[in-house]
Amino acid sequence: MPAVSYVLATAVLVLVLVSSFLRLLYVLPAFNPTIPHPRPRGQPTRLLVVLGSGGHTSEMFSLLRDLDPNLYTHRSYIVSGGDSFSASKAVDFERALETKRRHKQGTTPVPSTYDISVIPRARRIHQPLWTTPVSSLRCLVACFALLGPPRTRISWRSDINQHRTERLAPGTPPYTYPDLIIANGPATAVLVIAASLLLRFLKCRGTEGKMRTIYVESWARVNSLSLSGRILVACGMVDRMLVQWENLSRKGLGDFIGALI
């Protein structure tokens, strides 16, 4: 009887491991590339932007300079703890976006909102390496909540000529998980993308067809990828890896579509 139980337990374990492995291959973009379904213009669409700090933030907003708020009707920005520079740049960008939107002729404006969330840093500058797993785990746990429906919604109030922040009840429609995640550098981006893959791996409700990812390597990376970029490419974690120097593309490290900043 013990031998039979051992065989059954082993068979169940092998079945679980094989099923988990196959499910992981199905979820990882590198092994199962998919084409998103076209969306009608004006349909509620959520874009999540992972901001680094300093140069990474400046590069990101340069990338987003031609963003159409009628296509991405809600923008979620993630900034690391203590990074007030990136948070203020996000507010400035949204103000400029609203100004362009109100002066654009020939289009019908779609209700447009955004939110800014703060996440614990995955690793601080000069932080000892032996403490990094603890801070990274804390950051990863925080990612799950931030990938869910926005907790706040900031919209433009034309009557008072300023933004208004509104707290949302859990499950308030129409936004759930992000339709698209875009990042360009910080270690936090790896954890945000990892959290999105884990949610898809577990088939959490509402994740089907959501959280496609684009990682744009920094313009400063001429001959090699950053550590974040190497991790994402090696693990096949992103739907699209974009590089800004053609020689990186020739090495098979990403897609080159020209300088983006």
Image (cartoon, grey):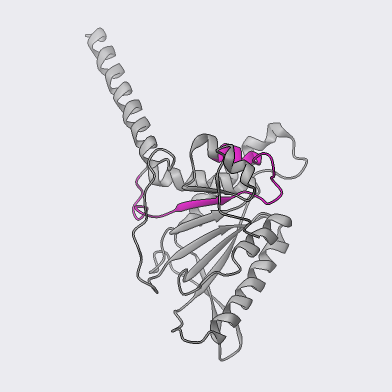
Q: Position of residue 47 (x, y in %)?
A: 49, 62
Residue lying at 55% horizontally and 40% vertically, measured from the top left = 232
Q: Position of residue 194 (x, y in %)?
A: 50, 43
Residue 35 picture location, percent across and down: 37, 52
Q: Is residue 124 located in the magenta-colored stretch of the structure?
A: no
User: Residue at left 56%, top 88%?
Assistant: 158
Is residue 141 positioned above or below 67 on the image? above
The range drawn in magenta is 203-232
Toward the viewer: 179 or 87? 179
Which picture quadrant has residue 92?
bottom right
Q: Quadrant of residue 10?
A: top left
Image position of 148 with respect to 254: above or below: below
Whole-percent x, y for residue 208 in the image: 34, 52
For the C terminus, the quadrant is bottom right
229 within the magenta span: yes
**Residue closest to the eye, 193 or 199:** 193
Q: Is residue 256 visible?
A: yes
Judge left or right: residue 12 versus residue 167.
left
Q: Is residue 2 left or right of residue 206?
A: left
- Count all numbered tags in the image, as a single digit: 0
In which quadrant of the rendered image does the N terminus lie? top left
Is residue 95 found left or right of 104 in the rendered image?
right
